[in-house]
Amino acid sequence: MLRDRAAAVDLFALVPALELRFEPELAELDRLLEDDRIFQQVKADLSRRRPHTTETGRPSTPVEVILRLLVVQHLYDWSYAQTEHFVGDSLVLRQFCRLGLDPMPHHTTLMRWSNLLQAETMHRLLDRVTELARSLKVTRGRKLRIDSTVVATAIHYPTDSTLLFDGVRVLSRLVQHAAAALSGSTRRLGLRRTRLAKHLVRRIEATAAVAASAATRAERPKLYRRLLAVTQASVRQADQVQHWLAGWQDATAQRLELALKRTAPLVQQVIAQAERRVLQGEPVPASAKLVSLFEPHTAIVRRGKAHLPAEFGRKIVLDEVDGGLVTRYSVLTGNPPDAPELPTSLAHHQAVFERVPSILTGDRAFFTLDNEQLADDLRVQTVALPRSGPLTAKQQQLQRSSAFRRAYRWRAGIEGRISVLKRRFGLDRCRYHGEDGMERWVGWGLLAHNLRQISRSVASGSAG
């Protein structure tokens, strides 16, 4: 049965000699999380765990405890296990999370509850926190700056050979589990095939070494053909096992059948792209490449950075307003241009702040004639979107004006904001799985960042 709140216990009153209390920022954060609209939105998602979660069953970890534990996890960039350990050992964090003297929930429990939160809920929570910031006068929405970055997924560096080996390894493991479920066999099916694939991958990697001889390099296509043959044999075996599993009603057999249905087509895609690129010498566009069997939504993003020619993850667009708050984020598919996101950012800003920003700025990737015209139609006072290519005398005069230059200098601050989000709030690499996991990871990181910004402003007296 889903519980709303924990029984009130004041740990600080139980140990008065220690004179424990919240530091000012944590005290303000504690008050922010008492907001009922935030609580109800989280509760609505957690209520979907079972048909009668709110009515029957054993008493759950209270919703407010789950909410606060997840905020603390992303506030300090901890894993689930670290959150369990550090919160359980701290009287201050126990009081903040409303745990009292109750045992700390196991980290797997926190993980299961966290996975119930929907991507749309994270956007609504971010909007609600922005409303709270407005009411506390932390921000007025007078300025808006936009930029994009990449959040990496938790994958190894993708090459055709390692992806083929991943396919052999995963399919062999699923086949072995299926054999155990169907016949009770403990034989390690596919072990020799997995070892051979691993050996071939190492030899292929040796052919790409700088010091490799011409003879070694010439051996590369032959090694790839052998590795492709091994992988195709694994796919055929998986198809046969999947056919056998189709007639079983056992829950384990059905789960394995679904896993094989999900994995086998991905391995076939890897085989096809390896044949095109290595054997046929045909270039494969980045949009058509699969770079991970475990995170198939991962995109190849090239942003023209000399030190980082290709990034593997998801491209996100961030909107930041005065007060240092990120009010909107969008997780993009593939590697689309940035400019089409600007109208959405302006529309969202109008919906949240009931006004257009006085200053709108972004880098040159956001400039188009349509975007410039849209900003003019909405009567944005200062639009600092630099153009690419040669400029007319009038355009040069505009970009050299003091208002344009002040606004564009302010734009540079979002680069520092992105750096803080990556270093401090985990936006360098997503540790959740799947597309929904990426949405939740980015959403929680931005939510924790905004809550910290608001609590710092209010605690320091700079709000207003």
Image: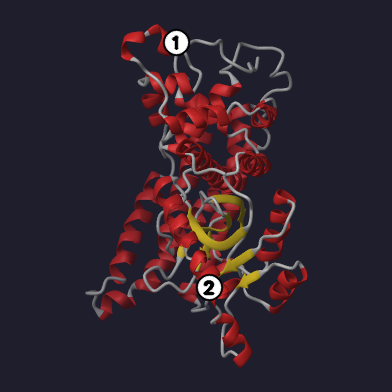
| Displayed quadrant of residue 7 | top right
| Displayed quadrant of residue 87 | top left
Q: Secondary structure at mark 2?
A: helix
Distance CA(mark 1)–CA(mark 2)? 61 Å
Q: Amino acid at mark 2?
A: Arg
Q: Position of residue 31 (x, y in %)?
A: 55, 27
Q: Position of residue 212 (x, y in %)?
A: 24, 74
Whether residue 149 is visible here, answered yes or no, is: yes
Q: Quick one: 292 or 47, which is closer to the camera? A: 47
Sequence-first tag of 1 and 2: 1
Location of the C terminus (image quadrant): top right
Q: Which residue is mark 2?
A: 276
Placement of 165 over or under 106, stated as above or below: below
Tell whether 424 sits left or right of 378.
Answer: left
Q: Which residue is mark 1?
A: 101
Q: Residues within 10 Å of mark 1 (few under 14, many from 20)?
A: some
Q: Secondary structure at mark 1?
A: loop
User: What residue is at 31 percent from the left and 76 percent from the top?
Assistant: 217
User: What residue is at 59 percent from the left and 48 percent from the top?
Assistant: 139
Q: Position of residue 258 (x, y in %)?
A: 62, 40
Location of the N terminus (image quadrant): top right
User: What residue is at 45 percent from the left and 45 percent from the top?
Assistant: 425
Q: Residues within 10 Å of mark 2 (few under 14, many from 20)?
A: some
Q: Amino acid at mark 1?
A: Leu
| Displayed quadrant of residue 393 | bottom right
Placement of 177 over or under 417, stated as above or below: above
Tell whether 313 sits left or right of 13.
Answer: right
Q: Nearer the viewer, mark 1 or mark 2?
A: 1
Whether residue 183 is visible here, answered yes or no, is: no
Q: Quick one: 314 or 208, which is closer to the camera? A: 314
